[in-house]
Image: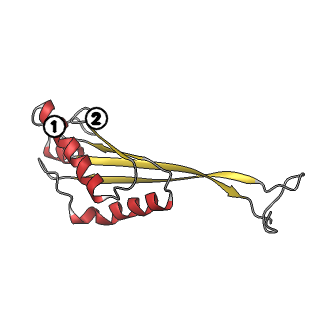
């Protein structure tokens, strides 16, 4: 074992688990699936996180606001999720689920609430074994 690692009574390296996570939130205009440029940095950060953690899988959740039919909103939310997937690196196993209006963040029937609900969300958590260094 490396001389800088902390060791146990048997001389083996001591490891700890370190959790790291990243979240992605991209908002869409009404009835749109076009990704606005203002979200490119967040999407690039997610792609870099996935590259650095290649055994990670990610689920992209697409969402819609409540105006319109449930069937239409379900298709729209899936298209939003697919827009993000197409922008991310396709080499990874990325799942996409369109939730339509099933998971509203804000159930009010106002433009502000609808704007808040038109989004995709993603969160990735990784646990790595890290060698504990000597003090």
- Is 129 on the left or on the right of 87, as rendered? right
Q: Is residue 91 above or below residue 69?
A: below
- Quadrant of the snapshot with the N terminus: bottom right
Q: Where is residue 100 in the image (x, y as percent from the top left)?
A: 21, 36
User: Outermost residue toward the right?
Assistant: 9
Q: Residue at x 79, y 57 (%)?
A: 13
- Quadrant of the snapshot with the C terminus: bottom right
Q: Which residue is under mark 1?
A: 73
Q: Which residue is drawn at 17% across and 56% down?
A: 34
Q: Which residue is under mark 2?
A: 103
Determine the secondary structure under disc 1.
helix
Label 2 crowd (10 A; few <14 / some 14-19 / many >=20): some
Nearer the observer, 31 or 60: 60
Disc 1 from disc 2: Cα separation: 12 Å
Nearer the observer, 109 or 35: 35
Q: Where is residue 26 in the image (x, y as percent from the top left)?
A: 28, 54
């Amino acid at each position: 074992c490396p001389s800088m690692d902390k060791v146990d009574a048997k001389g083996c390296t001591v490891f700890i688990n370190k959790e790291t996570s990243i979240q992605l939130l991209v908002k869409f205009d009404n009835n749109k699936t076009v990704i606005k440029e203002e979200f490119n940095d967040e999407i690039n950060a997610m792609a870099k996180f996935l590259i650095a953690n290649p055994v990670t899988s990610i689920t992209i959740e697409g969402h819609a606001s409540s105006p319109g039919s449930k069937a239409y909103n379900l298709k729209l939310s899936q298209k939003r999720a697919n827009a993000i997937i197409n922008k991310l690196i396709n080499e990874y196993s990325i799942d996409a689920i369109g939730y339509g209006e099933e998971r509203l963040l804000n159930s009010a029937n106002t433009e502000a609430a609808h704007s808040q609900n038109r989004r995709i969300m993603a969160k990735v958590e990784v646990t790595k074994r890290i060698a504990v260094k000597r003090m």
